[in-house]
Amino acid sequence: MRSTLLGLAVAVVALGLGVGAAGAEEMEPGGKLLLTGGVSALEGGAGGGLSTWALIGGNETSRGVGGSVHATYVNVPDYELRSVGGAVGLFDRIELSIARQEFDTGETGARLGLGKGFTFKQDIIGVKVRLVGDVVYDQDTWLPQIAVGVQAKQNNQGAIIHAIGGKDDDGVDYYVAATKLLLNYSLVLNGTARLTKANQTGLLGFGGDRNDSYKTQFEGSAGYLVSKRLLVGAEYRTKPDNLGFAKENDWADVFVAYAFSKTLSLTAAYADLGSIATFKNQRGLYVSLQAGF
């Protein structure tokens, strides 16, 4: 998988450099507007929490290199998810991200026969390239900011994944995202199409006894800028259903993101993750703290 990712990364970065060369001089140097670098998505990089957006992480524009680090915690009745990671934005054109996720089964692990506190860990490396559009400067056109990307994922529990019907403990997601900021209406809209085989975004492996082929999934987000520091909104993310032993539901949330400054923001959400590994009604708190430059 690492050699595959390296080849993809080189190709995507080369594409981004080629696309960005002509337009690099069009923007004046300086920091981005608050929240226009996004918050840290669940899988690393810039997004809205549950979904990945076309925004490039960090606070710098086309004249600089920016970045961010995040810590995320999700608590639902039977599980906990913890994530830490970071992203680097190169000239508001290319984003490189990394995240480490820990899916803690807690007391539920014993009921599943895995042992109390059994934890799945997943590493995610991402590359994103902005192709066209600018979320801030393109206010006189309906063209959104559009980006493409890949996310390579590696789970550390291959034996368990195979035991529950999963086909692989690693996989690669491919996506195209479109983000539009309508400043006159204080609205931000995003739609992402993701090609994936991931079970619970990869936390339970990739592919399964019901299906082992790539399926296109949709991630939609809408937010309202109450002020330049405060964004409220909602997200919906469709999921594949590959494993025979447990149905996988779509995810949804309602969120609030607040920028204390250009360097620090907090996102809080009420998330509905549906059924996870036979345990239904997994609804609870999502909190993510991000520091950027």
Image: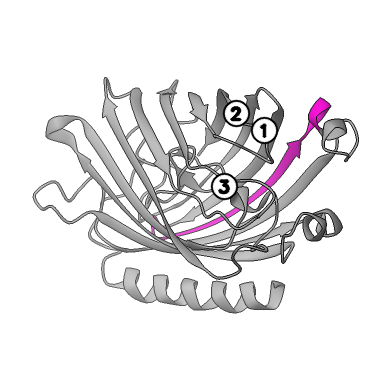
Circle nearer the N terminus (2, 3): 3
| Disc number lying in front (2 or 3) | 2
Marks 2 & 1, CB-CB < 8 Å contact: yes
What's the magenta region?
91-108
**Is residue 130 or residue 165 the one in the foreground?**
165
Spatial CA distance of label 2 from label 3 is 22 Å
Q: Give me the disc on residue 44.
A: 3
**Is residue 30 or residue 1 the one in the foreground?**
1
| Label 1 secondary element | loop
Left or right, residue 16 beside residue 207: left
The three-letter amino acid code for the residue at tag 3 is Gly
The three-letter amino acid code for the residue at tag 1 is Phe
Q: Position of residue 293 (x, y in %)?
A: 50, 39
| Label 3 secondary element | loop
Residue hosting label 2? 282
Classified by dominant secondary structure, the portion drawn in magenta counts as strand
Spatial CA distance of label 2 from label 1 is 7 Å
Marks 2 & 3, CB-CB < 8 Å contact: no
Instruction: Indicate whether 65 appears above or below 132.
Output: above
Q: Position of residue 280 (x, y in %)?
A: 61, 31
| Disc number lying in front (2 or 1) | 1
Neighbour class for label 3 at 10 Å: few (<14), some, many (≥20)? many
Residue drawn where x is 52% and y is 68% of the image: 214
Is 105 part of what is drawn in magenta? yes
Circle nearer the N terminus (3, 1): 3
Residue drawn where x is 26% and y is 27% of the image: 224
Residue hosting label 1? 279
From the image, which quarter does the N terminus lie in?
bottom right
